[in-house]
Image (tube, rainbow, N blue to C red):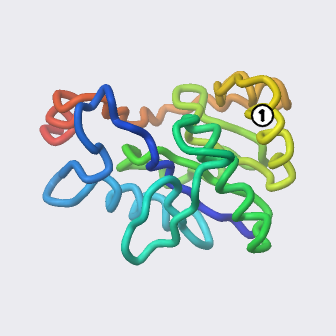
Amino acid sequence: MKTLGAILAGGRSSRFGSDKAVALLAGRRLLDHAIAALRPHVDAVVVVGRATEGQPMIADWPAPDLGPMGGIAGALRHAEAEGFDQLLAISVDCVHLPADLRALLEPAPAYLASQPVISLWPVSARGAFEAQLTESGDRSVRRFGNGIGARAVASDFVPPNINSIADLDRLAGL
């Protein structure tokens, strides 16, 4: 299976208070940590929702500010156009991922129960994502996944969830 990795980086970071993607952890941007964490699990990496030097930028679909669902829908469109079979999505604050992430999530569709944005989707789910966004307005990845029969995968891995400077400071102290 040819897998595209997508880092969802188009959020407003309103809870964080500034642009989370460029916040520094150990001297590197969170976005750079996320790229490095995702790269071993996929055939190619794209950044969704922001331009980043050296990385293809994919727009959210159908428009910005639709949360992770819009980012995943945009990435699925790109994956389909480029001949990928599936999409592995993470958020920009996923600076660590388990070594067995693909094994945990395959076969698609699946998501981590503790953090549904960390998810694996077949490219064939693109139409369902788009219908969810344009017809229902519901933007919950968990509800969408449950609606199409995606597996909610339990794992001992606790993904970082950096929603504030205090969360970032706590992670830096570990």
**Residue found at x 74% / y 58%:** 77
Residue 171 placement, left or right of 80 = left
Residue 153 placement, left or right of 21 = right
**Residue found at x 57% / y 61%:** 58
Q: Front-most of 21 and 117? A: 21
**Residue found at x 44% / y 57%:** 50
Q: Quadrant of the C terminus?
A: top left
Give the quarter of the image for residue 129.
Answer: top right
Q: Quadrant of the N terminus?
A: bottom right
Q: How far across and down, in percent of the image, does residue 7 sit?
A: 50, 54
Q: Front-most of 61 and 27? A: 61
Q: How far across and down, in percent of the image, does residue 130 sit?
A: 78, 41
Above or below, 52 against 159 in this view is: below
Above or below, 142 against 34 in this view is: above
**Visible residue check, residue 31:** yes
Q: How far across and down, in percent of the image, does residue 88 sit?
A: 63, 53
Bin the neighbour count of mark 1 within 10 Å (Cα to Cα): few under 14, some 14-19, many 20 and up. few
Count every numbered label the image shows and give the total.
1
Residue 93 placement, left or right of 72 = left
Q: Front-most of 147 and 138? A: 138
Q: For the view shown, which residue lies furthest in the front direction? A: 63
Q: How far across and down, in percent of the image, does residue 31 sit?
A: 35, 56
Give the quarter of the image for residue 109.
Answer: top right
Provide the residue designation for mark 1: 134
**Residue found at x 53% / y 26%:** 114
Residue 22 placement, left or right of 131 = left
**Visible residue check, residue 1:** no
Callout 1: helix, strand or loop? Answer: helix
At label 1, the amino acid type is Thr
Q: Front-most of 64 and 113? A: 64
